[in-house]
Each structure stands twice: as C-alpha cells, then as structure tokens.
Amino acid sequence: MRLINYLEALRPSYPGLGQDRKWNGTTGAADVQYCPRLEEWPGFWTEVRQVLRESSGRDFRALKHPKNREGTGLGGIQQARQNQPLLSAAGVSTLLDITIGHPVGEILRTVYDIETTFEGPRSGVTIGDPSRVLCVPQEPTWQKGTNVHPIACNKPLMVINAKPSWVLYLTPYIITTFNQQRDKILSQPRGRRCQNELVRAVSQMFAHLHINNLTYGVLTTYHSTYFFKRLDVEGAHPRLLVSPIIRRTDIGEKSLAAAFVGLAVRSFRQGHRTAALGTPGPFPRVLEANQRTNRKHFVVDGPPQTLSHPFDGHTRRVRRGRGDPPARVRARFVRFLSRNLASTFRGVLEVDGRVPREVIFKIYDLSTPEVAGVCDDELKAYAALTPIQGTHVPRIWAVGTLYGIYRVIAMDFCGSPVPQPPPPEFYEQAPVLFRAIHGYQVVHNDIDLRNFMVLHGRYRVIDLNSAKIGTPEQILREERYLKNLLHKMREGYIY
C-alpha cells in the first residue's frame, strides 16, 4: 500500500472514553513572562510534504489498510455525539496512543526505518511531565554493582500535552488570541496576574521544550491540534512558531498523522546529523546563557533556614527573601543521574560569583498536582531535619523555580551508591542514621539500599520524597522494618 493511500484511508475514531468531567491534569504552575509571543510557522505543510513525498510512487507491503471504527467504544459501548466533550484528560492521551501512535509508529518503521514509541514523560524526557513523548527507544543504562534503577536513555523527538476539549478550547486564531492575552497579563502587577487555560498550556509547552532543548511540541484536545517549533538562535530571544490548526477529521497529507510523521522524521534526522548553530540538541540545556537575552530565570524562594549558604548565581538578579540582598544565581546541569517523580542531575551552582559548588539538583514539575504535593512534603521533611542536614541527610543549599513550573532543589553531593553486598560498617551506621531522623519525628517511608549513599566512609540517607512527619506508632513501625531489612540483607536474602 502506498503511504498517501494509507493516510487518506486513516480515520482517527472517537471512542468516547470516560463519562464524567474529571480534571486533575495540571495545576496553575506556569509563568507567561518566560514564554515568547507566538508567530506563524511559514511553510509548515511544505516541510511535512517534503518528508512524505520521499516515498512517492513506492508500494509498502507491510502497510495494511487501516481499520477505522468510528463511534465504537473501547469496551464496545456506543458513544453519542453530544457526550464527546466529556472525554477525560487520561482519555485524550489514551486515544492518541491508539488512534495516532500506532499508525504513526507503523509508518515510521515501515517507510523510514525509524523505530518510535509514545512514552510517558518519565521514560521520554529527562525533565518535566508532559502527557506523552514521541521518542526513539534506547537501551537503559545500568549502574553495575548497585541496585539503583537503570537510567532510561530514550531519544525524545517531540513532547505532547493533551487536554480535554471542555477544559481547553483551541481557537483557530491562536496567535492573535494568545498574544493579546499574554500582553494583557504582563501589563498587570505581578501579584495580580491571572492566567487562563490557553496561556498556561502554551507556557507549559514552551517550558517543556526549552528545558529539554527540544524543537517540536504538540498541544492537542484530540479534536483540535497545534504543532509548535522552538527556535533558539544564539544571541537572540527564543522564538515559538505555531502551525495551522489540524482537525481530527482532516485526512491525507494534511492529517494529524501526516504532521506527526513529517516532524518526527525531521526531528530524528536533526539529532543524527550536523545541526546548524543554535539548533537545540537532545539533552537538557545548561542553565546559563547570554546575559542580555537570557530567559532561564532561577528564582530562589526556599525556606529561610535552608539558605545559610546562598546559591551560586545565575544571570538574573533575584531576592532570596524579604530584606535579603539581591543574588545572582547560576545553575548548571552537568550530568543526568536518574528520573522518577523528580529528575536528578549532578551539577554546579554559583551565587554572586563565589567559588562554584558541586551539588545534586532535584527538579520537580509543579504542573502535575501529585508531583507538586510530593515536592512540598519533601521540603517539609528537610526543614524538620535542618539540625542534621549535612551529617545524616543531604544539606539543602537553595530551593528555586524555573519558568514558574519547575521546582529545583540543590543539595549536597553525597557520594556513591552503597555497593552490593554492603560492607560491615553499613550495618552499624544505618540504625544510627535513622535514630537521628526519627528523633525529629520524620518517617522516611522508603527504606531501601538505593537510598543510602557513602562518601569517604560516611553514610547518608537520601530521597525523602516519601517522607512525612510521623506519629510515634509510625516511627516504631519503621524502626522494626529497618531492623528486619538489615537482618535479611546480612543473611544475604536481599540487597
């Protein structure tokens, strides 16, 4: 079957997942002042057609006629047209996986010999929580001699933010609408700015692109979709181009699947060939740029008691708190370490030109309510453990935000994971560490060998994102659990 015939036959269906208005997809975390104005994407369809017509005249036996089941529910239930706006946030992402992800993956694999997959954010990008990531799967990197989770090294091609159509209306005049609303918001005093869903969604999209150094992004309600292109030329402000609106019912060379295929191929080739100066690469950007044009602000706003050693600078003057002098904060992400609820980097931070300090950065995406709550709990736990920071748990040097969406925590570098099997001194120090932690009524809730680090023979407990202020009963229960775990480890049952 020819590619153009396949695209013309493809009809993305609307199964109508979900019957209730459940919306907990994002919080209000975003700041439009860091997002550039939208510009028209000239030649969008020309770029897509150039890729599609590379296979003009060729017949692909592996491409079978797509089976379209318009109006059929995934559970065999018919969905009435009037209920279409009730698609849930999770339903939009699921529909994309089934009706767009599968055919797009088949086309890329068969026609262009590119293996791709729609992944969740934690295996697709190193920072942030977009709804989906179109990426090229890679083998994970294992850290030998430890039980630390492997590092996913998938190559992201584009990030996708999905919203229900009853939450976000994607107007056909998105450039005019967004720019007018953006200018209106920025004209208000900072404390009185109120961002609507469109401004917030586009700002979050730009943040995901910029922090991960990606070119292409997608904002979709499944019924309507826009593609975005980020341009970051050295010495100039970032630019954000937007495509014409694409409807679910569009077919052929101007369909949603065609746009995904064309831009995925261009993104893949861009990352595997020599790119022009200023073209984004596949890895997170260093948070340091031309001071005149920089938009990567690091705003320090952490608990006062954790800022006895202020962060070592960035390219924008900020204040650490009321009455504090301005500080220039610069944060550099040097090496990606791991990804779960938070992204972890080894890096360098400077404040006011002082000697750079080697730190570990933890980065949370505050646009996801669950993740924002975990971040708050971790900061509360560290605040309670202030007297033993640096000895039993990492010292927090500063807490800040990027783009109004990412919470960045800079803490001590605590060494390396504990080897397997652990040395004898580990069994002596582990109970001592937790007696000190429990002395401040903090329950860790995730005791595991991977959450201990060792540096020059000194052990520390890390990863407090499950920690809570606990009751005496909870503390006693965790002490018994630790004793039992250490016994099993000493006997060789578990590491």
Image (cartoon, rainbow, N blue to C red):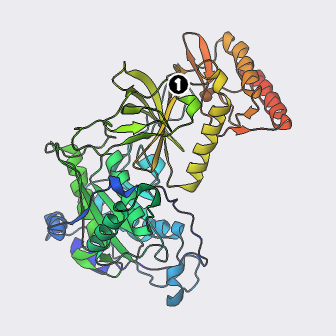
Q: Residue at x 46, y 52 (%)?
A: 129
Badge 1 marks a residue whose secondary structure is: loop
Residue 9's spot in the image, x, y percent?
31, 80
Residue 101 visible (yes or no): yes
In-image side of 491 versus 387 (left or right): right
Tally of numbered discs? 1
Residue 385's spot in the image, x, y percent?
67, 28
Against 339, residue 448 (above or below) is: above
Residue 430's spot in the image, x, y percent?
70, 19
Task: Say which quadrant the N terminus sits in.
Answer: bottom left
In-image side of 200 versus 238 (left or right): right
Against 56, residue 27 (above or below) is: above
In-image side of 322 versus 468 (left or right): left
Task: Say which quadrant the C terminus sits in.
Answer: top right
Against 56, residue 33 (above or below) is: above
Q: Which residue is mark 1?
A: 308
**In which image quadrant can residue 188 be found?**
bottom left
Query: Which of these two is toward me, 346 or 5?
Result: 346
Residue at the farthest front position: 323
Against 188, residue 347 (above or below) is: above
Q: Amino acid at mark 1?
A: Ser
Residue 476's spot in the image, x, y percent?
84, 31
Query: Which of these two is toward me, 198 or 119?
Result: 198
Instruction: Using a 10 Å C-alpha cutoff, classify the residue at mark 1 as few (fewer than 14 neighbours), some (14 to 19) or many (20 or more).
Output: few
Query: Which of these two is toward me, 353 or 454?
Result: 353
Q: Residue at x 64, y 26 (%)?
A: 386
Q: Residue at x 34, y 34 (%)?
A: 314
